[in-house]
Image (cartoon, rainbow, N blue to C red):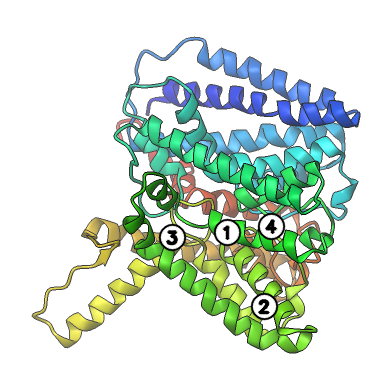
């Protein structure tokens, strides 16, 4: 294990985090909320530790998959810890555990909150809280690869595979650094377009930025207690709906459109399945809830918003969907597990994994009926080898084991099964609100410290695709000569 190179990357990430805190510092100065000192103190801590660990590059640049997974997991934990300190130092979130929960929820783009009164936060803390979504959406290490001249050592692909969501990661261009730049340019442009459209609908600049950060990262932290329901405008809610769905699409599709390879872009199998699931869910829920609204259009509007919010794991809400009929709630719970596309900012299992898994089951059934037939599993017109199928199957095994163990521990708080089950589903799939005691009109503050730490682990494991977190806590990882 090359500990030196891991701490070298850790230092650079802390330096980046310090620079990113300039945004809430600027907000604090503009609004005069008195929180500038809290951010400056944390920035100083990050810069000092960052300088100590980066002023001299390690002699050995050996970097394998193990170092990549450990680096990503460790960096996300440390990033979240220092990101939580401004909330704690300011006293706006008095408990360090709660501050850490809120920040991990932000960076992992989960959106689960312990705050009873979101509007009670100062403007700079609100902006930092929402900005963590944008930073975590595409990945802070992908951002590091895009801006820093750290070539050499063969680490780039290992880092990108460990941090990027989905069963596989490919290069859009021959160089990982160029790929990372392209991804972040697309990400930034789409965010700015949403900001402009929200401003055109009359939303204030502060609200537009915070909402766009939450939408782009598919995170869902609102700056109002009633989330997006506060903006009683079909236009504004419609813009958020569209962009939630767009940010749930694999960013490779946008790259193909950018280079005018339209045929490849529009034939993306995963994107078509993803949009098909959304369309089917919206139609079924609209028909199921139309009696609860004044018109079919109103039912369609809220159904589309909540389906887009849940499947992309954003977690915004316009209504209390916990009071919808059981059929609609069952669909939404199912969408929590499906998630968005691989290579997007969304969480969940990912549509590509579900597709591979279903095709694998189909091939197994056909093999039983026709033992002599030879069938190849194909996705995006490409044959998937046994390694990919094995990886997907192992992911599902680890997923359900951790999920069941988490529900078991959270049940110690003695909430009803729906609350315990959806609390884990909402955090493990990086969604935000669950149902029951953790529904869209409630929060996670009433859970015990033990449950909060379990759910924090679930948020990190869900965002990093499980295995980086498991590797970090595996004794074999740290064993010499492994």
Residue mark closest to the camera, 2 vs 3? 2
- Tell which circle, 3 or 4, labels the residue nearer the N-terminal end: 3
- Tell which circle, 1 or 2, labels the residue nearer the N-terminal end: 2
How far apart marks 4 and 1 lie (CA) works out to 13 Å
Label of residue 398 in the image: 3
> In the picture shown, does residue 278 fall above or below 188?
below
Cβ–Cβ under 8 Å for marks 4 and 2 = no
Q: In front: 349, or 340?
A: 340
Residue mark closest to the camera, 4 vs 2? 2
Please report the residue visible at 75 percent of the width from the left and 68 percent of the height from the top: 439
- SS assignment at label 4: helix
**Percent coordinates x, y for residue 351 in the rendering:** 44, 64
Q: In front: 64, or 214?
A: 214
Return the residue at label 1.
428
- Quadrant of the rendering where the C terminus is positioned: top left
How far apart marks 4 and 2 lie (CA) works out to 36 Å
How far apart marks 1 and 2 lie (CA) works out to 28 Å
- SS assignment at label 3: helix
Q: Residue furthest top?
A: 56
**Percent coordinates x, y for residue 69 in the rendering:** 42, 39
> In the picture shown, does residue 447 fall above or below 92?
below
Return the residue at label 4.
451
Q: How many residues crowd mark 2 within 10 Å: few (<14), some (14–19), many (20+)?
A: many
> In the picture shown, does residue 238 fall above or below 151?
below
Q: Judge whether residue 325 can be spotted in this image.
A: no
Return the residue at label 2.
300
Q: In front: 220, or 410?
A: 220
């Amino acid at each position: 294990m090359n500990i030196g190179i891991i701490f070298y990357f850790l230092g650079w990430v802390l330096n980046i985090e310090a620079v990113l805190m300039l945004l809430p510092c600027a907000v604090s100065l503009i609004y005069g909320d008195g929180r500038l000192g809290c951010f400056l103190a944390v920035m100083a801590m990050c810069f000092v530790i960052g300088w100590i660990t980066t002023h001299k590059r390690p002699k050995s640049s050996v970097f394998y998959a193990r170092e990549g997974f450990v680096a990503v997991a460790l960096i996300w934990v440390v990033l979240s810890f220092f990101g939580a300190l401004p909330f704690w130092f300011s006293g706006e979130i008095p408990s360090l555990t709660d501050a850490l929960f809120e920040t991990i929820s932000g960076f992992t783009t989960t959106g689960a909150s312990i705050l009873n009164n979101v509007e009670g936060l100062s403007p700079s803390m609100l902006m930092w809280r929402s900005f963590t979504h944008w930073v975590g959406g595409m990945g802070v290490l992908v951002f590091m690869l895009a801006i820093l001249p750290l070539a050499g050592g063969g680490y780039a692909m290992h880092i990108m595979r460990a941090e990027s969501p989905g069963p596989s990661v490919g290069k859009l261009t021959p160089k990982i650094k160029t790929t990372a730049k392209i991804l972040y340019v697309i990400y930034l442009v789409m965010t700015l377009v949403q900001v402009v459209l929200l401003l055109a609908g009359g939303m204030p600049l502060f609200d537009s930025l915070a909402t766009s950060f939450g939408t782009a990262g598919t995170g869902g932290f609102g700056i109002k207690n009633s989330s997006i329901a506060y903006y009683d405008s079909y236009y504004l809610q419609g813009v958020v709906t569209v962009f939630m769905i767009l940010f749930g699409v694999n960013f490779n599709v946008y790259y193909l459109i950018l280079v005018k390879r339209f045929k490849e872009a529009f034939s993306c199998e995963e994107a078509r399945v993803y949009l098909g699931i959304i369309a089917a869910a919206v139609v079924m829920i609209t028909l199921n809830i139309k009696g609860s609204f004044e018109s079919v259009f109103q039912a369609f509007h809220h159904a589309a918003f909540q389906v887009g919010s849940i499947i992309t794991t954003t977690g915004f809400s316009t209504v209390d969907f916990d009071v919808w009929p059981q059929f609609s709630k069952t669909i939404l719970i199912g969408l929590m597990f499906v998630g968005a596309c691989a290579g997007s900012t969304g969480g969940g299992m990912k549509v590509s994994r579900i597709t591979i898994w279903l095709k694998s089951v189909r091939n197994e059934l056909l093999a039983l009926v026709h033992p002599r037939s030879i069938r190849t599993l194909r996705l995006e017109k490409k044959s998937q080898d046994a390694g990919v199928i094995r990886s997907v199957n192992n992911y599902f095994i680890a997923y359900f084991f951790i999920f069941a163990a988490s529900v078991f521990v959270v049940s110690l708080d003695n909430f009803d099964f729906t609350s315990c089950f959806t609390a884990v589903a909402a955090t493990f799939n990086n969604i935000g609100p669950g149902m029951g005691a953790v529904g869209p009109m409630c929060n996670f503050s009433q859970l015990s410290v033990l449950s909060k730490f379990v759910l924090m682990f679930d948020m990190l494991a869900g965002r990093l695709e499980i295995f980086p977190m498991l590797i970090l806590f595996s004794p074999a990882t740290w064993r010499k000569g492994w």
